[in-house]
Every structure is written in C-alpha cells, then in structure tokens.
C-alpha cells in the first residue's frame, strides 16, 4: 500500500503503518481516556461516557487517507480527447486536514491544473486525490508536493500545477492567535515548472474564474 509515496516524499522514513502494526480500537480509546484525565476532566460524568469511542471513530474518518492509495484513486485515464491539449483546471477544491505538529485543523482549498499529453483524468479523481492527502497529518508544503507529484507520476502529463490556500488553526487557536491569516503554497512540474508563460497562464485562469 502507498508504494508510490517512496518516490514522491523526500523523507524516506515517512511510511504508512500496516494495520497489523497499529494499536487496537481499545488501546486507542484508552489513549483518549488518558488525555481527558490529563486535561483535568472527570471521565465518569455522563457527557464523557462515550467520548473515547466517538473520538476513535472520528479519527478513523478524519485520517482515512492512510488506508487509500492515491495512485489507485486516480483510476483510469481517457485517451479520446479530440486532440485537446490545453490546460485542464479544477479550482476551489475545499479540504480539511490536520497539522502534523499540533494535530489541529488546516482548512483551505486547492487549485489543480495539468497539461494533457494524449490522456485526461476524470475530474472527480483530482478532488479525490486532494482528499486522500488531506486526511493525513500534514504540512501544507508537503501536501502540495504530494498532490502534484502523484498526478504527474500516474498521468504523465506535460506538466502539473498545484496551488493551496489554507488557514492553519495552530496559528489561529494557539501560539500567536492570528485569525484569518492565509498561507499559499505552489508546486509545478514539467512545462509549468520550466515555462514562465505556463505558470502565468495558470495564475491568470485562477484570477479570471474568481
């Protein structure tokens, strides 16, 4: 599972643990119980009786991206494109992720474009790829590169462009506590990386479609 990550993530220690190496549901619930006690809660009160199991279930959903191979999610490609070879842009893909440093939310949107080389993707597959990487502990920089390089590896287009705009709750809820601050990251491959005109075209299309 996720063998493709070996080729797209610089940190070779970053791997997805197989389920056989993960703690059990009961152990996860015990960990939640420990944290509740650590913050000073009375874990015997009625409102918290089912919280450990609810949190474990929620984590299974919020971090479900670890159990899906993004290369598989991209699925089949299509060759009957009528000679179309101009940019394909999917913008405003909303996502919720979590910072790997503090495990608090990252809320944002992704814009993904590629230049076809005889094949195109189903548009929903691009959004699905964003979702898979978002449902893992992340840094925004790494997530941006993962999306671009996965699409580049699977589709082999002439180039891929990814821009992510996001607000980090680790800045809004703690630390400097600055609400509304947005971080923007980009990653370009192929012609988008090598041709400034293609980068400019990508940026112009984003502005024109706002």
Image (cartoon, helix red, strand yellow):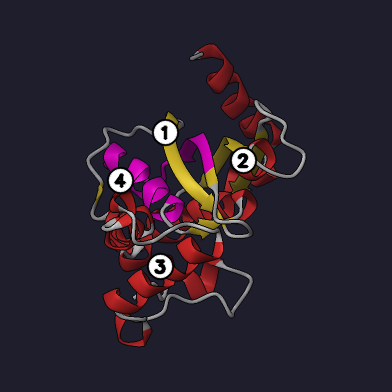
Residue drawn at x 63%, y 39% is: 173
Give the distance between the C-alpha atoms of the residues marked 3 and 1, in whole angstroms: 35 Å
Query: Residue 9, position in %: x, y?
Result: 57, 68
Can you tell which mark lies on residue 93? 1
Query: Which of the pair 28/135 is nearer the observer?
Result: 28
Mark 3, mark 4: which one is toward the viewer? 3
Q: Earlier in the sequence, mark 4 or mark 1?
A: 1
Specify start and end residues of the magenta stretch as a single range: 106-134
Q: Which residue is mark 4?
A: 125
Query: Which of the pair 149/200 is nearer the observer?
Result: 149
Does residue 94 appear left or right of residue 124 in this picture? right
Camera sees residue 12: yes
Give the distance between the C-alpha atoms of the residues marked 4 and 1, in whole angstroms: 11 Å
Mark 2, mark 4: which one is toward the viewer? 2
Q: Earlier in the sequence, mark 2 or mark 4?
A: 4
Mark 3, mark 2: which one is toward the viewer? 3
Report the label total. Answer: 4
Could you tell me which secondary element the residue under label 3 belongs to? helix
Can you tell which mark lies on residue 33? 3
Q: Which residue is mark 2?
A: 168
Q: Earlier in the sequence, mark 3 or mark 2?
A: 3
Mark 3 in CB contact with mark 4 (< 8 angstroms): no
Q: Earlier in the sequence, mark 2 or mark 1?
A: 1
Give the distance between the C-alpha atoms of the residues marked 3 and 2, in whole angstroms: 27 Å
Query: Residue 136, position in %: x, y?
Result: 45, 59
Q: Earlier in the sequence, mark 3 or mark 4?
A: 3
Residue drawn at x 36%, y 43% is: 126
Work out which residue is located at the far right of the displayed protein and give it.
176
Could you tell me which secondary element the residue under label 1 belongs to? strand
Mark 4, mark 1: which one is toward the viewer? 1
């Amino acid at each position: 599972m996720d063998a493709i990550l070996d080729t797209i993530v610089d940190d070779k220690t970053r791997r997805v643990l197989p389920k056989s190496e993960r703690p059990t549901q009961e152990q996860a619930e015990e960990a939640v119980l420990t944290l509740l006690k650590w913050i000073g809660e009375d874990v015997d009160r009625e409102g918290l009786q089912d919280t450990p199991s609810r949190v474990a279930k929620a984590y299974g959903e919020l971090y479900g991206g670890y159990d899906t191979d993004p290369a598989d999610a991209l699925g089949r490609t299509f060759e009957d494109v009528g000679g179309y070879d101009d940019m394909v842009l999917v913008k405003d893909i909303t996502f919720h992720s979590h910072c790997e440093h503090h495990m608090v939310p990252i809320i944002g949107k992704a814009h993904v474009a590629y230049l076809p080389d005889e094949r195109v993707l189903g548009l929903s597959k691009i959004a699905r790829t964003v979702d898979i990487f978002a449902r893992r502990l992340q840094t925004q920089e790494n997530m941006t590169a993962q999306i671009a390089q996965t699409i580049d590896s699977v589709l082999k287009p002439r180039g891929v462009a990814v821009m992510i705009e996001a607000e980090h709750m680790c800045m809004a809820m703690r630390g400097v506590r600055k609400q509304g601050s947005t971080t923007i990251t980009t990653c370009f491959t192929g012609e988008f990386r090598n041709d400034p005109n293609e980068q400019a075209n990508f940026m112009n299309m984003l502005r024109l479609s706002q």
